[in-house]
Amino acid sequence: MAVASAALDAQHHEPVDQLYAETRDMRLIGFLFFLFSDVVLFSSFIFAYLYLRNSGQGWPPQGVPRPDVALAALNSAILFGSGATMHYALENWKHGKFFRYAGFMIATIILGAMFLTGQVVEYTALYTKEHVTWGGSGIFGASFFTLTGMHGFHVLVGVFYLITLLLQSVHGVYSKDKYFGLTAGTLYWHFVDVIWVVLFSIFYLI
Amino acid sequence: MAVAAVHTSGGIADHIHPEPQGFIRRYVFSIDHKIIGIQYLITGFVFLVLAGLLAELIRVQLMNANGGFISPDTYNEIYTMHGSAMVWLVIIPIVTGGFGNFIFPLQLGARDVAFPWLNMLSFWMFPVAGLLLFSSFLLGAPVAGWTEYPPMSLQGGVGTSMWCVAIFLVGVSSTLTGMNFMVTILKMRAPGMTFTRMPLFVWAQLATAPLSMVATTALAAALAALFMERQFGIPFYDPARGGSPVLWQHMFWFYSHPAVYIMILPVFGIISEVLPTFARKPVFGYKLIAFSSVAIALAGFMVWAHHMFTSGLAPYLQLPFMILTFTIAVPTGVKIFSWMATLWGGKIHYTTALLFAVGFLALFTFGGVTGIFLAAVPFDLHAHGTYFIVGHFHYVLVGGSLMGIFAGMYYWFPKFSGRMLNETIGKWHFWLFFVGFNGTFLPMHWLGFLGMPRRVAEYDPQFQMWNRVESVSSFIMTFAILLFFINMFVSMRNGKKAGPNPWGGRTLEWMIPSPPHYYNFKNIPTVYALPYDFSEPLPYKGLEDELNDKPPAQLAGAHH
């Protein structure tokens, strides 16, 4: 935390006033704690999934196909790409390049929306072709739809979060020195990315 | 003074926000940590009365071996609600939200917690959750005990779903409070207050906050899954549909074992403040007490399956869980011996607060020792599901947490209200409670050995005599708690004026008026050493103006 805030301070020439710096540090730590508790929430459901999967019924359960790894891989690439565009959005903001920042933000939002669309396509295919449902396909439906759905909900929230941040920055809420909201948004987006790495591995790869 | 100004001027710690105006903003939707703390205490005590009355219904029912007072179904609802309310609506909110909110920011030399609005939000989730939980009686309350093991919890009435939502809500409240407290302790300590100069109550909150944050989130997941299974038929726990009831037990106890420490660590903090003040002697082993709290908190995450020795846990897992549980006795023992050494050779003042603290030492140690019994797999297999368990956890939760809460109330009530609690009534409260408590819960141990199962509305007639002893004793205990409430009501208006520091305490909360101003400190003090050296001068600078009538320099416009 201390390292992160020191790095932020080193970005600009004029010192940020102390009140803002302390508030920002507190919010940063608080936000990281929030993300951490979200990690615990996902971890608990992941534990539940792995526990049920290894409870001796075989995986996937009878009558349920393995989910389509090709579509999920494409979707993963989209989400990881959005992580990169998010990173460049924040970097450009720090360097005062507003239009580049806005471009990368819009790209991130579009990629996030594409990921969600991909998920809808996947769910629809599972339902129409294989008749896999949340409550009607045993522990597969329960764990797969709960976990990927929770993640999708986080992406959906994230898309609206980024739209809000973009509108706020257009309206001058943030300056070159004071942009904690954007830092938080970036952290949130990377967090959603990292969760997906884990979900992709445990549902599609193993 | 000059040092303090250099350290804090312009910083968040020194910022005084305008005084809240109007009744609603001052006392209802307040963002002042002290008001929020008192809100938690009052709400917690209201739920204590309700959950205590449920306990008395249980005791009245058990006076006769063949019951007859209430139906077995109602009996199931009552013990379930008694346990759920006492854990989530009484002890956890009082020791973290109540004492934590009021006391530790003052002890840090802070003007408020890090996120005051979040603090208000956390508080208001709690009474809403409580109302939701108690209103489940109208629709058929949960019946599977406070642990709500499936598949029974899947079959209970709609009240079980309300139970899920209510506990989820208090859980979110607890998680947010934990984050808030963590950031406050990490970022808002007064200048010079290093970690090893923090009062032990703050250390206790620092050890508790991550438990609230991490463990409670895991419970949220378990509750969400139970709710989804009950309402939407999503198979997680029902073995008939591929789920696993043991999964619930893992997820539930991964939270609920750390929750045991959420309920006791802040109380350890209270005891660590009360004992040195009334022994007039530095606390023995400051660092040992501080770090052992953290050790207990960490180890508390690795022992959850000792609640599940009878649920078919693989033997190769039973052994490590047994040994890890034994090791928790080490940091706990470090604390007990440090407290005893604090009293040793001290000039002890036998106030009510001290009596409760010493009573805590005796009863908590007893409950801790039976805990060691139960950690041993061969013993647990016999005692599981008997009254021995009920006796054990009431010794740690009532004899431990609730005694500590009373110690804290007698100690800090003058700071909360500006008035002293009556010491004579206080001593009646203590002795009646102590005798009533032991009469209620001690016989449970041998009843358990003899094979009386818990959670039953009727029992073998051979146990009736001891059950009657327990019930009569529990009425004495209830009467003692009634005395406590009378004491508070009378003293709030007519108690002796307390002044800033009636006990000669040395932590920062005693350096300012009782009750404190909404901004706590006129000037943020600088801290030079630990507070507990009773023979040394106070280790603070910058407190000269706290007790006079001058307004704080910031508000008078003389500063900046």
Image (cartoon, rainbow, N blue to C red):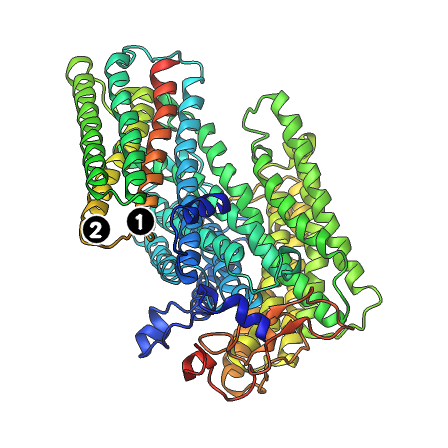
Q: Please, what is the three-letter code of the amino acid marked with disc 1?
A: Gly
Q: Position of residue B123 (x, y in %)?
A: 39, 60
Q: Which mark is residue A181?
A: 1
The reply to the same-chain question for discs 1 and 2 is yes
Determine the image quadrant of residue A35.
top left
Q: Is residue B183 visible?
A: yes
Residue sitting at the far front? A13
Label 2 Cα crowd, 10 Å radius (few <14 / some 14-19 / many 20+):
some
Is any atom of residue B234 visible in this view?
no
State the residue at coordinates (63%, 76%). Answer: B426
Q: Which mark is residue A168?
A: 2
Residue B528 picture location, percent across and down: 67, 66
Q: In the rendered view, would you say A156 is above or below B86?
A: above
| Subunit bearing disc 2 | A
User: In the image, what residue type sits under mark 2?
Assistant: Gln
Q: Which of the two residues, B91 or B534, is positioned nearer the viewer here?
A: B534
Does A104 sit left or right of B12 as displayed? Answer: left
Q: Secondary structure at mark 1?
A: helix
Answer left or right for B108 relative to B70.
Answer: right
Q: Residue at x 60, y 34 (%)?
A: B306
Picture quadrant where residue B205 is located: bottom right
B328 in relation to B479, above or below: above
Based on the displayed image, in which of its 4 quarters is residue B499 positioned? bottom right
Asked whether the residues under the numbered discs 1 and 2 touch, taking CB atoms below 8 Å apart as contact, a structural biologist would say yes
Instruction: State how far apart marks 1 and 2 are (Cα).
Output: 9 Å
Quarter occupied by the N terminus of chain B: bottom right
How far across and down, in percent of the image, does residue A39 sit?
41, 36
Q: Secondary structure at mark 2?
A: helix
Q: How many residues crowd mark 1 within 10 Å: few (<14), some (14–19), many (20+)?
A: some
Q: Quadrant of the C terminus of chain B?
A: bottom left
